[in-house]
Image: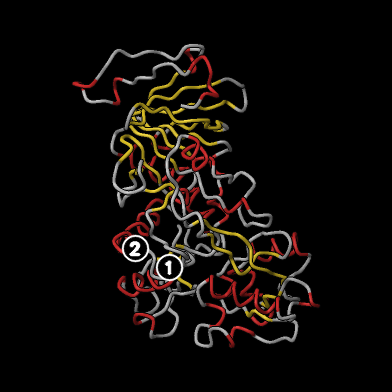
Amino acid sequence: MSEKFGDYRGSFKCVESVPPEEAKELHEPVGVDLHNVHRHDAVIVGAGLAGEYAALELKKAGHDVAVLTKIFPTRSHSTAAQGGIAAALANLEEDHIEWHFFDTVKGSDFLADQDAAELMVREAITVVYEYEHMGVPFSRTPDGKIMQRYFGGHVKDFGRGPKVLRACMAADRTGHALLHCLWENCVKLGVRFYPEFFVLDIITEGDRCLGLVAWDLINGGVHVFHAKAVLFASGGYARLFNISTNSRSNTADGLAIMMDNGFPIEDLEFVQFHPTGIAGKGFLITEGARGEGGYLINDKGERFMTRYAPSKMELAPRDIVSRAEWQEIMEGRGIGGQEYLYIDLRHLGAEKIKERLPQIRELSMKFAGVDPIEAPIPIQPTAHYSMGGIPTDINCRVLADGKSKWLRGMWAAGECACVSVHGANRLGTNSL
């Protein structure tokens, strides 16, 4: 722990977190109210999808689990994910996990760890069906299967074919639907939540993490959490940029704590800029809007992606589309010479927009002053997702040296972790 914790740094031990032969006398921290000392089998930092899914599985396995979050759990940033969750279900047309794997690796600029990418695409199908069985209200096909839509970079036949329907969707509120369902299941099983607790530091001794220290934002006061296992699922760092799709609560606290304790961080240079953030505001217009058939147009009314990705057009990988947009703007084809372009949904028709993209219509009307049924939405590339983070192995164990040495008792998952399944660029719907 760092010096900022003054007189209660002490010698923190948790006898439950070490093998019996290594157990030592338990010393309580000096200067902390003993009512504020907690013990759990596992403590998870962050109540987004990664954190709550881990909590649910640990609770099912019979462990005492606590989840710390600085906001109320259902306000976590995972609710902002709109378009879908990728899985090769083949509900509407032919698809294979091998195609999904190829697209993921190619979309990463071939920098993804391929063992991690293979595991992700194989597990994705099982995870989606588990969500369905939990009660997630996915959109449905006429015969009752999970509805899937097109998304950028997802194509058939190892990149040679046309686009493929792979993004499993709950209209344009997929993250909201998933997180609320997870929250309900966690509450049902008795997962212990500590809402509005801000994590300050981890407790380590040698090569072991023994717990963490947090501040109670409601009542004040320092709390100490002893645990056999600590999982950071605390989100990414794209909020560092002036205009970002990330919520104001998404401030990369986990990464900051690890850096403050001298641990390495991996691939910080890989930040994804989403092609369609509302100009000047950052609110996300889901890629699902392009998956449903939306057009990107410049000041001349041209679908400019014909110059950059004539086969995939608006559904090229995000890095390609964002670079194309910026080139259009730099060459003077931004709308009215300004630093933004348009996404046009008018040709989709009012019925389809209201059914498939209701939240996009609401966000556009509220933050851009535009009803997409009647006019195009002003958009620009916007900081969106962090590919870098806390280095982990394929089992999410934190690597203390960034290579192979495990910081025992500590894991990281979700956007704060770097396994690296996304390489230099993440495909849309591969995050959930």
In terms of sequence position, does the residue under pointer 1 or pointer 2 come before the other?
A: 1
Q: Which residue is mark 2?
A: 117
Mark 1 and mark 2 residues within 8 Å of each other at the beta carbon: yes
Residue 163, horizontal then vertical, whole percent: 45, 81
Q: Is residue 358 visible?
A: no
- Residue 400: quarter of image: top left
Type of amino acid at the residue the image marks with label 2: Ala
Location of residue 226 with respect to 268 vertically, above or below: above
Location of residue 291 with respect to 128 vertically, above or below: below
Q: Is residue 258 left or right of residue 306?
A: left
Location of residue 275 with respect to 220 vertically, above or below: below
- Name the quarter where the C terminus is drawn: bottom left
Type of amino acid at the residue the image marks with label 1: Ser
According to the image, what is the colour scheme of the structure? secondary structure
Label 1's element? loop
Q: Among all residues in the image, which is located at the extreme right? A: 336
Q: Among all residues in the image, which is located at the extreme left? A: 21
Label 2's element? helix
Residue 211, horizontal then vertical, whole percent: 40, 28
Residue closer to the observer: 297 or 393: 393
Residue closer to the observer: 139 or 422: 422
Q: Which residue is mark 1?
A: 108
Q: Is residue 139 visible?
A: yes
Residue 176, horizontal then vertical, whole percent: 54, 53
Which residue corresponds to the image point at 61% horizontal and 43% vertical from the top-left? Answer: 249
